Image: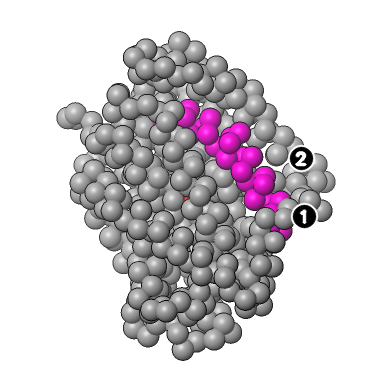
């Protein structure tokens, strides 16, 4: 194998990693979770999780990946020098596959909304009609599946072509634009009459809503949104140049990702209350509230097209990182060409995706533990697989890699300072694992 590809420079790393982190998780999943978990209290716990669990694990994953210079399974082998810890890598690859199973479906929805925005706009529709139209669409057997297949094909082509040329370049232009657009929508949304109730829901934590379940969900959301606990940041870490300050990059990615989540919630909840939509609605929340905002903005037709286009792109940069985890694994471990690996992985994802999409409509009577297959994939990955794999990764990096090697990696071979190192190691060794375990224990006790 030739020289391993790498991202170009600090900005490249930031945008590619933020491209992975910022996605449907922020604009679609975060508001939905917030709404279902009682608002402000969830937000607060989410922020605690992002700092106490997210930051250390992302740093651990980046340094692990850059040390290992391989896919997520290969990295564990190379860094430890044995095959003993490979299973953590396998869990990551499996998790990437399961996430893509439902993520691809939602990615398909975003494309359909681009199409709808172009074809007729949303301006003639009332809140009621918007909500009905989403419900009618998502349960159809064919249309969402076709959009999903189209999206996954584009995704495959980008990964096929290599991450650097395609994605790094596009991200540099489009991510800032998305941020700008979300800000515009926030401003319009908070100035809607009746919107202040939405802000209160968001920023006034009601601690009576704080159950062990809510805490588990917030932790899951932090893992999901920051793309942690499944080898994505480990794989990306292996493409990061040896001269990059990993600590800085991690901080920037986390701040950016959290900002987009909060801004999305600020764009969505005032509308929810102003229009009398139920805040705890499910996956449809973003898709029915945001078109309502466009209706209130002059030139809404254009804004809507632009927004859904950018949302698809944000989704694409995340989907690419998920596919990259699987592709790098298949091609490096099974010695299959990169292109073939990307295609095989995509076909597998499409099959899962068909099941997930149909589970919302024609197959909705088939349930797994009371969940549709779509919800099951979403729930099981974010709430269990990611935190548990994340726990294993942090355990491995904190206890098996060794302080010296870790410090060397984070200081780029002692050429830069990492003043935070002692704090980081303390968090990673004790606080982060303990926090994850406590959340699970708390949940289990509640269960019985
Ligand atoms: N973080 C992405 C989002 O918020 C989803 C994702 C999860 C991407 C895991 C990669 C790995 O949409």
Vertical placement of residue 114 versus 129, above or below: above
Residue 150 located left or right of residue 375:
left
Q: Quadrant of residue 121?
A: bottom left
| Quadrant where the N terminus is found in the figure | top left
Residue at the image position 62 percent from the left and 76 percent from the top: 193
Residue at the image position 70 percent from the left and 39 percent from the top: 440
Q: Where does residue 331 sit, x and y in percent of width and height?
A: 28, 39
Q: Where does residue 401 sit, x and y in percent of width and height?
A: 47, 17
Residue at the spot of label 2: 442
Q: Which numbered tag is attached to residue 206? A: 1
Tally of numbered tags: 2
Q: Where does residue 215 sit, x and y in percent of width and height?
A: 70, 46
Among all residues in the image, which is located at the extreme left?
2
Is residue 46 on the magenta stretch?
yes
Q: What kind of element bears circle 1?
A: loop
Q: What kind of element bears circle 2?
A: helix
Residue 432 located left or right of residue 99:
right
Observer-nearest of 71 and 258:
258
Observer-nearest of 86 and 231:
231
Question: Whole-Å distance between the Cαs marked 1 and 2?
Answer: 20 Å
Contact (CB < 8 A) between labels 1 and 2?
Answer: no
Observer-nearest of 372 and 17:
17
Among all residues in the image, which is located at the extreme bottom?
124
Vertical placement of residue 359 versus 368, above or below: below
What residue span does the magenta drawing correspond to? 35-62
Q: Is residue 368 visible?
A: no
Is residue 290 on the magenta stretch?
no
Vertical placement of residue 259 versus 7, above or below: below
Label 2 Cα crowd, 10 Å radius (few <14 / some 14-19 / many 20+): some
Residue at the image position 57 percent from the left and 21 percent from the top: 423
* Marks 1, 2: nearer the viewer: 1
């Amino acid at each position: 194998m030739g020289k391993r590809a790498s991202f170009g420079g600090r900005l490249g790393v930031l945008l590619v990693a933020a491209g992975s982190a910022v996605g449907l998780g922020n604009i679609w999943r975060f508001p939905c979770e917030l709404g279902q978990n009682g608002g402000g209290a969830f937000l607060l716990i989410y922020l605690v999780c992002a700092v106490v669990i997210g930051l250390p694990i992302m740093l651990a994953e980046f340094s692990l990946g850059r040390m290992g210079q391989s896919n997520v399974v290969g990295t564990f082998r190379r860094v430890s020098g044995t095959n003993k810890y490979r299973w953590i890598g396998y869990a990551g690859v499996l998790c990437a596959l399961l996430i893509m199973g439902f993520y691809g479906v939602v990615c398909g929805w975003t494309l359909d909304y681009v199409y709808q925005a172009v074809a007729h706009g949303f301006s003639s529709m009332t809140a009621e009609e918007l909500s009905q139209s989403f419900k009618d669409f998502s349960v159809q057997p064919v249309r969402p599946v076709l959009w999903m297949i189209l999206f996954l094909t584009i995704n495959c082509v980008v990964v096929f072509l290599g991450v650097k040329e395609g994605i790094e370049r596009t991200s540099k232009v489009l991510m800032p634009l998305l941020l700008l657009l979300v800000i515009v929508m926030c401003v319009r949304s908070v100035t809607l009459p009746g919107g202040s109730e939405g802000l209160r829901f968001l920023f006034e934590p009601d601690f009576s809503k704080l159950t062990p379940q809510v805490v588990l969900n917030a932790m899951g959301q932090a893992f999901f949104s920051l793309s942690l606990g499944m080898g994505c940041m480990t794989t990306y870490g292996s493409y990061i140049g040896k001269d990059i300050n990993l600590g800085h990059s991690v901080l920037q990615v986390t701040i950016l990702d959290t900002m987009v989540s909060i801004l999305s919630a600020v764009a969505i909840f005032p509308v929810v209350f102003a229009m009398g939509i139920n805040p705890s609605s499910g996956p449809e929340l973003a898709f029915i509230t945001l078109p309502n905002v466009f209706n209130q903005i002059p030139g809404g037709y254009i804004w809507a097209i632009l927004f859904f286009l950018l949302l698809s792109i944000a989704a694409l940069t995340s989907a690419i990182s998920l596919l990259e985890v699987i592709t790098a694994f298949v091609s490096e471990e099974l010695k299959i060409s990169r292109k073939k690996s990307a295609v095989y992985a995509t076909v597998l994802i499409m099959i899962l995706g068909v099941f997930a999409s149909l589970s919302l409509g024609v197959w909705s009577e088939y349930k797994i533990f009371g969940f549709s297959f779509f919800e099951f994939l979403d729930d099981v990955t974010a709430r269990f697989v990611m935190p548990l794999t994340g726990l294993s990764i942090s355990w491995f990096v904190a206890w098996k890699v060794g302080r010296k090697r870790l410090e060397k990696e984070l200081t780029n071979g002692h050429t830069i300072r990492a003043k935070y190192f002692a704090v980081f190691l303390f968090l990673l060794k004790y606080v982060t694992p303990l926090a994850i375990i406590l959340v699970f224990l708390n949940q289990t006790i509640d269960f019985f």
